[in-house]
Structure formats: structure tokens, C-alpha cells
Amino acid sequence: MYSLERLGWSEFFSSQCKQTETNSELVAARVAGENREMYRLLSANGEFMAEVSGKFRHEIQSRADFPGVGDWVLASMRSTEGRATVHRVLARKSKFSRKIAGKKTEEQIVAANVDLVFAVSSLNSEFNLRRLERYVSLAWESGATPAIVLNKCDLCESAEEFRAEAESAAMGVRVILASAVRGDGIAEISEMMCGQSKTTASGAPPTALTAALLGSSGVGKSSLINSVLGKELLDTGSVRDCDDKGRHTTTTRQLIVAPGGGLLIDTPGMRELQLWDAREGIAQAFGEIERLAAMCKFRDCKHENEPGCAVQAAVEARTLDVERLESFHKLAREEKFLAAKQDSAVRAAQTKSLKTMMKQVNRFYRDRGR
């Protein structure tokens, strides 16, 4: 059993319980695992398997309203059975979201209520600056603090050069060289996870920080977590000789309480990472371009071939990498396109809801007239 503070409980969540009347029998718990709408909850009363109530299922508006790993929920516990029923999901202080894979325009919550997002890349053919920019943009949008972990530095002779490249593509973001084999960077990751949690008001219990490790399959997220935990808790796979890629080992998201302080969320590798409502995150990830844009001659400058464009002037002066500008344009176009699709999807859902309601109204009057 853990105290709520050890699981990341804070005033942000307790105030929500104070502001609204809640059933005294409901207990606060954190979602530590999710698989096909079955949830593993951690609480001060122990660990429970849970599902959502029928009323909750009826009232939710979208897939993103279901509990996600890292969420805080209010649930009724059946201690003798080790089971629980989720009645409410508390408002999230942060969420790392992406568009669900495929053609549907839906939000998928990858990790909720995280303080830190470690974007993990391995120092082999998987290393991609443009992908890191995408992760950092979504991390800033989530409300968490991003950091980049360049794993498997023990297999790379030019690790410092890769670090410099990553720092140039993610200005102001901490970049850590790590090796789960040699132990490089593990202390630095642990320090970020629990350093702040030990600094609390006098007499108040420390609130644990939550960190999510995100990245492609086989970059070594599970190995890094094992190193932070100091034990082989998660399955890991070796690198394939044929394509220099790691084997996919993590299949579900799970929240793990680290013995040294803090909590870790392990996630399956992402084959694609499409944006979701990331306008502000892009602006923060490409802060130097935003600052240059403020000096452009025209307020609506697109930074392409307009006269007086400070961004293009920086490219010509070689103080701004042209590939970084192209990446900025690509993400901005993708965000704009997705926003339009979201608006279209909302309108379609509203129209469908209105049609259903009108059918019910017509049926009511038809039945009453019989």
C-alpha cells in the first residue's frame, strides 16, 4: 500500500473533491494500468481491478473521457473481491495526447497527470531530429516539462555530436546521454524524477513526480526503467542485427512506483505520432522562430518569400537551420489540417445528436396521439 502523496496526489486533485459533493464511500485511486476498458487501480487501500460504472459510460462524450494511465479517479471498492467500480475521473492537470492511429479524428490519451516527459531515442539509425521536435511539441502542449534521452550511448562513438544536434533542435530542453548497460544518465533521470518532490512546505508530505517515457519501439525505454528501478521488472529485447532496431517488448501502458521516489509510466513504442491540438506546443518548441516572426514586416507573414521576413533573413544569414524552418512549416500545416478535421467531426457529431433527439421527440408526439 502507498499513501496518496506517494502516488502523486496533490491539492489540485483534493480541491476537486472539496468543491463538489461526493459520495463518502468513493475512494481516490490512480490508474496504473489499462487493458480493454479494464483498469488496475492503486490506492491507500491497496490494488484493485476495476471497470467503469454504467452511468459513467452513458454520460461520457468521447473516447478521451475514459480513464487513462496516470488518471486519478473516484471509485467504490469491494475489498473482499479485490474489485472496484470507477464513477468519476478527476480533471487532469496535464495530458500527453495524440491523434488516434488511422483515419478517425479522435484523441488518444497516452499518459495523464505527468510532470515530466522523457522523449527517448536511441543513438543508431533510429535517431531523427524531426521526430524529436514532434515529441517536444506535444510534450510542451501536454503541460509537462520535456526532456530528451539519447539511449545506447555506449554503442555510439559520436554521442556528444548527437547531443549537440538534439540541443539545437530542442532549445532549452535538457538532453541526457544514457546507457542502460553502463548506467550512464540513470542518476540524472532519477534526479529529475525525485529532486523536486523532496522540496515541500514544512510539515507537508512530499508529492511524487510522475514521468512518462515515450519513443519508438526498441529504443530501450523498458531497459532504462529497469535501471532506474534497480531491478529487472520489465521484459526487454535485444537489438536485431538485420536492421539495427530493438524488438518490441512493451504492449500496454503501466504506471510504476519507483523505490527511490517518483513514478514512471512505461508506454508501448509508437509507430506514428500525429499531432492533437498542439498549436501552443509548436510555438514553444520553435521559440526562436516565433521570436523572429515578431520582427517580420507583415503581421501575417508566412515566412516563405514575403519581403521584410525576419525568419527568411535568419535562414540566409545561416543563424537558422533551413531544415528546422521546414519542420516548423510541416507541423504547422498538419496542426491546421487536423484542427479543420476536428471542427468537421464536432459538427458531424452535433448533427447526429440533433437528429437522434428530433427522432425521439417525433416518436413521443406520435405515440401520445395514438
Image: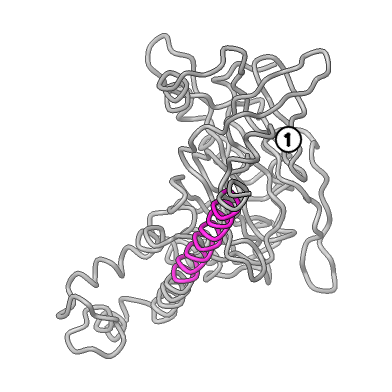
Q: Nearer the viewer, residue 76 or 132?
A: 76
Q: Give the x, y percent position of residue 138.
A: 49, 57
| Residue 313 quadrant | bottom left
Q: Give the x, y percent position of residue 312.
A: 28, 83
The residue singled out by tag 1 in the image is: 39
Q: Is residue 5 magenta?
A: no
Q: Residue at x 62, y 60 (%)?
A: 121
Residue 62 visible within the image = yes
| Residue 285 quadrant | bottom left
Q: Nearer the viewer, residue 152 or 8?
A: 8
The span shown in magenta is 338-364
- Tell me the amino acid under the disc marked 1: Tyr
Q: Is residue 3 left or right of residue 46?
A: left
Residue 177 visible within the image = no
Q: Residue at x 74, y 22 (%)?
A: 47
Q: Give the x, y percent position of residue 73.
A: 59, 29
Residues packed near mark 1 inside 10 Å, few (<14), some (14 to 19) or many (20 plus) = many
Q: Is residue 238 left or right of residue 290?
A: right
Relative to 107, say whether 67 is above or below: above
Q: Give the x, y percent position of residue 61.
A: 56, 48
Q: Residue at x 71, y 18 (%)?
A: 77
Q: Is residue 344 magenta?
A: yes
- The N terminus lies in quadrant: top right
- Number of marks: 1
Q: Nearer the viewer, residue 62 or 94?
A: 62
Relative to 288, say whether 253 is above or below: above
